[in-house]
Image (tube, grey):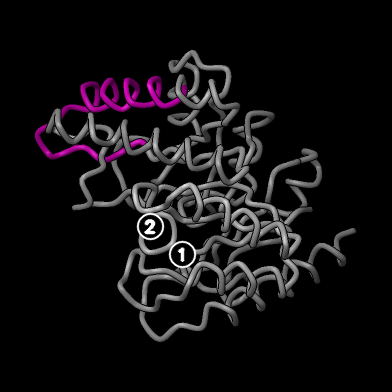
Amino acid sequence: MKLAFNTFPFSSFPNFLPTYPLEEAIRSIAAIGYDAVEIGCCAPHAWPQQLSRTRRKEIRQIASGEGLAISSLLPAIGGGFGCNPCSVLRAERHATIEHYKEIVDLAADLGAGLVLYIGGWRAEDLSHEEGWAQSLDCLRAVAAHAGDRNIVIAIEPTTADTNLIDTASDARRMMVESEASNVRLMFDTCHIAYDGKPLSSYVEEMGTELVHLHAADTNRKAIGDGDMDWDNLLRSLTASSYAGYFTVETGFGARGIDPRGIAARSFRFLKDRLEALA
């Protein structure tokens, strides 16, 4: 199974500290043994408007020189940043579509074939139906732009953080209603745990449409440092012939963390479990 690591613990998202250069993050992730890197699209690493053509080529060359694929790009969508697909503000919704398009273009420039889609969060006075329609409009526009560049868009249910796409069935409904052949599904283990389901449940519910996943242990600890049932998930992925990246997205949210240590512990644990289950 191919393993990837997300750059958020090396960046300033969602907290301001710590922050390391993207080059250092890529080289650290490669040295540990990962197959790929998922780049979080936040400053100073990969905010699209701040990356020149030259810089994009540099990033791609650095990863390639380390033997590391750039598997996917994760938009840094969160409250207060001016990007919400179902915002009550028309201007914010428009800006969100444009931002997603810029990330799709960045993915094409970096050789990443996948961009994640976070459906957004509803204001208290916005109905679910209206919020759904607005997010769907955003997804359709982004998917059309991505289709022209051979980029897949993966919808992520974010149960713990938002209030629109909460479950695997929500994500599937959004995918179907997008009517776009390049829209698929993904999940994050922390959101499954918040939903109170076994980790394997979303593998079964998403089926062949599952193309990506995020993994983090309890409270975003390193894989193996919490109490999640990883054997349950790994067995299910193997049985389903999952062909995407197993992407470790953890270790962020506090200052003073050691992203290299978190990445290394997670990698060793996963390798050990995969060998034991083989």
User: Is 107 one of the magenta-colored residues?
Assistant: no
- Where residue 244 sits, quadrant-wise, is top right
**Amino acid type of disc 2?**
Cys
Magenta stretch secondary structure, dominant: helix
The reply to whether the C-beta atoms of the residues labelled 2 and 1 are less than 8 Å apart is: yes
Secondary structure found at label 2: loop
At x 38%, y 36%, the residue is 100
Indicate which disc, 2 or 1, sits on the residue closer to the N terminus: 1
**Residue bearing mark 1:** 8
252 or 171: which is nearer to us? 252
Q: Residues within 10 Å of mark 2 (few under 14, many from 20)?
A: some
270 or 192: which is nearer to us? 270
Residue 75 in percent (x, y) is at: 41, 47
**Residue bearing mark 2:** 42
**Amino acid type of disc 1?**
Phe
Which residues make up the magenta segment? 119-143
Secondary structure found at label 1: helix
